[in-house]
Amino acid sequence: MAHDIRALVSILNIELRQSFRSTLRRVSFPVAAGLGAFTAVYPLGNLVSISFLAAFCCAGLGIALTMKRGAWFSRLAVWFSVGLVWGAGSVLAANSGKFPDALYSWQITSLSGWSIKDARKTASGNTALDVAVSSLACRQEGVEVQMEFPRLKTTNKAANMSTHDERRPQRHGFSERGFNALLIIDAEPDIAAGDLFTAQRPNLIAADNAMFFIRRDDFSSLGPVSRLAVLRKSARKTFQDIIRRISGRAFPLADALLLGIRNDLDANVTAWFRDSGCAHILALSGQHLSILCSLISFIIAKTMKKPKLAGWLSLFFAILFVGIAGFSPSLLRALLMFGIGAVTAALDRPQPPLAILSLAFLLALLFQPAESKSLGFMLSYLAMIGLIVFSEPLGLFISNFSIPDVLAKVLTASVSALCATSLVSVTTFGRLPLIGIITSALAGPVLLAFMWLLLAGSVICSFLPPLACLFIPIHEYLASMLLAIMKTGALVPALSAEKEPGRAVICTGIVLICLFVYAYPLLEYAFFEARQGHKKKPP
């Protein structure tokens, strides 16, 4: 017995070493850069100087290994250092848009700028609006100062205040491009990304994230900042009107699934999706983009008989759709992955999914550095990592049970994404709705049919408006099916822990399950080799 255990441990040790080496060999340079950027943004965070020091050390290690003929590992070290520098630069860019410390002691009397996201309705009925501040007025002890960004023109409105007055906000306390803020307005202004605004008497609620409360009478929308913003706002409104015409009572849900607008969605419906573990369905993501693009690609490929043209037209449609719906972190990630995959395939240099995800992560840090710490950004990339890393070993594990292939694939995708995102979800919300595995699997086909019919109905009824009456009952029926699944799933209690020790236990259990599933093929092979060796042993 002891000999068998020693043999099993020896075989398992050899297999683990070989698996680790083969995995390390499969790490491409984009993945190494992505890991470096991830290290700089999350574990190190605001310790930018340490990130740069670590990048310098990794680059030196890479050069030293090159001299010892370790070319492959040295390149990984160099690319990891590049990722560290990239991530540190993203952190600096994100911090440059924070509320200036120099304004803490001043009373802000007015704000002006433009919106960087579409307005959204909060749970309390107010409107939340992310903006970039281009000018502000503040005062202190009878002194009024007007500031304009990005050149930071400071106008002194007090005759007795000199340029070197200590009460005056100093130039070094501000970024050249101003700062970003979150406005909470007790109204429902029709304002989209790219609209100019002005706000009087803003009330600073939280200085850490520059959150201001503004009354409806003190807020004014001045219209789009550019012609492109005008075109986007017009296209968005037109598309929304078409959706309203063909969806009937299902319009709030259809509006949320196609355009990400949840202003008309009932609070109970949002709670059903959240409690059933399907909150990601209401957030526009790669799942929605893939559903829409697959329909476009299928139609073009069948009608024109040109698969390559179908791929490029699908990419164009994806860019158009994301431009209308808004560049949320999850949609931008899906669009970047789609574009990188199309370009690398066209150049005859196809990349593995993890390399494409790493490149998309690096580009997202470049385009949206301030979003890197948002929950939607992290959950989107973690879900994709789970699908890429855990799908294969989890599929092998599920294949041992008598489950149909279609259901097995759906369960594999749901469990892989849940395992990867659960650590963040549990530590943030203290709950893990395991029923989400089942509700996601059941809602998938209904969601697919609902979104395909919405898109097809929008195109058809744009040219033939009288046909809208044919689509309304179908859309209402599919919406009722989807809501029934969510409502039933919300009745199942979630695994919850309000205190930190309980959350740590749940996270530890999730990690152990993931390790077991990932190591299951190795364990199975080690047991097989141990049994074979025992059979061959002479009597």
Image (cartoon, helix red, strand yellow):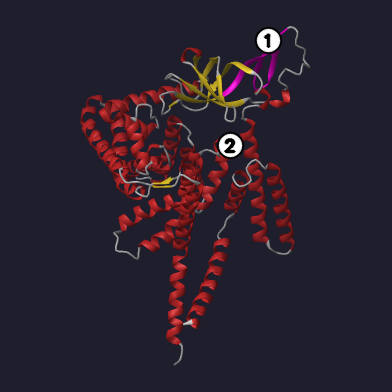
What residue sits right under mark 2 in the picture? 369
Q: Nearer the viewer, mark 1 or mark 2?
A: 1
* Percent of width and height locating residue 336: 50, 41
- Magenta region, main secondary structure: strand
- Which element carries disc 2, helix, strand or loop? helix
Q: Please name the residue shown 68% across and 63% down the image.
A: 70
Q: Residue at horizontal 42%, vertical 50%?
A: 418
**Residue 483 in sight here:** yes
Q: Camera-side residue: 176 or 363?
A: 176
- What is the x, y in percent for residue 538? 46, 91
In the rendered structure, find residue 397 and report the number of the disc placed on it. none
Magenta region, residue range: 132-158
Residue drawn at x 44%, y 52% is 419
Q: Alpha carbon of mark 1 to alpha carbon of mark 2: how far?
A: 38 Å
Q: Which residue is mark 1?
A: 142
Residue 186, percent from left and from top: 45, 19
Taking the image as drawn, is residue 350 in sight?
A: no
Looking at the figure, which quarter contains the C terminus? Answer: bottom left
Report whether 271 appears left or right of 497: left
